[in-house]
């Protein structure tokens, strides 16, 4: 995520196809706000990048209970591997995670039951790696890093704020904080700190990023390695940092084993 960049190309809108109600949204409740700031109801608006409204298209395709998969034993088995002094202990809780997924009914519920278990394993593999077994709420040395894309005028940086990694997948950059806040219901550009103080919002930012950028890659059959590329590819993939890739893969295969599924192919990026 830290290096994940969004290139927005806005084409010329033809007068004959203007089914769009307003730029920068403010849509009616039955319409989605697209990643480009327009209102509509099909996949282009409610799919990847959807900022608010009935996002993520069709309903779940199976009856998997995420709560029954992510048991106390599974969740606490991750937390218990962190040091007792970690700030994330007590902040990252299973209860907060389960409340957060209420906003994302498709998480862990698309495809077969095996697909769902692999997705859950993949999500927690990345979370484990990013947070050190739920130890870190904020990126180490984050305040010293500049994650402001000044070319992104839709979500301009507040110069007094830092958009460094926070939360389970370490949300970073103004072009992620802005739309995440808009979708979830907080001011991502002017109050990014809430991701490190409100555990439910914190989990929701991770799930927002996952549903908009990662789930479709995994479920399309590209394998776990493709999810690494989405989250931190430029810093890890193609030989950039094989040790961190191995770390993510190790967690993923372990969690797949715990959840009773095979990890599949294409594990590395």
Image (cartoon, grey):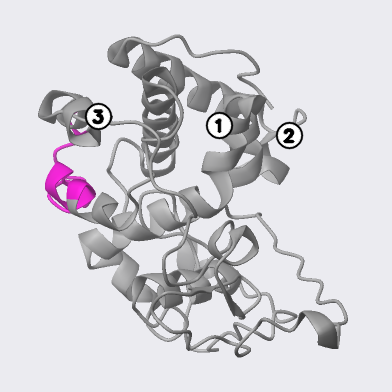
Vertical relation: 130 (above or below) 151: above
Vertical relation: 152 (above or below) 253: below
Q: Secondary structure at mark 3?
A: helix
CA distance separating discs 2 and 3: 27 Å
Image x and y of residue 83, in percent: 20, 36
Q: Residues within 10 Å of mark 1 (few under 14, many from 20)?
A: some
Q: Is residue 74 visible?
A: yes
User: Disc 3 marks which residue?
Assistant: 78
Q: Is 95 left, or right, of 38 in this rendering?
A: left
- Residue at x 11%, y 30% (from the top left corner): 72
Dot label at residue 232: none
User: Disc 1 marks which residue?
Assistant: 219
Mark 2 and mark 3 in contact? Answer it, CB < 8 Å: no
Residues shaded magenta: 79-98
Quadrant placement of the C terminus: top right
Which one is nearer the viewer's eye here, 42 or 239?
42
For residue 81, what is the image quadrant?
Answer: top left
Residue at the outermost front position: 16
Q: Secondary structure at mark 2?
A: loop
User: Disc 2 marks which residue?
Assistant: 240
- Residue at x 71%, y 33% (from the top left corner): 237
């Amino acid at each position: 995520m830290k290096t994940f960049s969004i290139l927005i190309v806005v084409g010329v809108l033809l007068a004959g196809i203007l089914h769009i109600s307003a730029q920068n949204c403010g849509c009616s409740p039955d319409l989605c706000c697209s990643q480009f700031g327009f209102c509509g109801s099909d996949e282009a608006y409610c799919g990847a990048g959807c900022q608010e409204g009935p996002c993520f298209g069709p309903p779940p395709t199976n009856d998997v209970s995420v709560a029954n998969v992510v048991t106390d034993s599974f969740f606490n088995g991750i937390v218990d591997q962190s040091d007792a002094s970690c700030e994330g202990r007590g902040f990252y809780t299973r209860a907060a995670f389960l409340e957060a997924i209420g906003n994302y009914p498709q998480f862990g519920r698309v495809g077969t039951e095996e697909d769902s278990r692999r997705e859950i394993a993949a999500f927690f593999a990345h979370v484990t790696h990013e947070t050190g077994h739920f130890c870190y709420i904020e990126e180490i040395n984050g305040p010293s890093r500049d994650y402001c894309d000044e070319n992104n005028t839709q979500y301009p940086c507040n110069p007094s704020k830092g958009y460094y990694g926070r939360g389970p997948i370490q949300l970073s950059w103004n072009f992620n904080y802005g739309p995440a806040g808009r979708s979830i219901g907080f001011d991502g550009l002017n109050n990014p700190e809430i991701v490190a103080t409100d555990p439910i919002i914190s989990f929701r930012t991770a799930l927002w990023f996952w549903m908009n950028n990662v789930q479709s890659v995994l479920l399309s059959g590209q394998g776990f390695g493709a999810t690494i590329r989405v989250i931190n590819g430029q810093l890890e993939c193609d030989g950039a940092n094989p040790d961190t890739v191995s770390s993510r893969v190790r967690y993923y295969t372990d969690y797949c084993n715990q959840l009773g599924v095979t990890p599949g192919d294409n594990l590395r990026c």
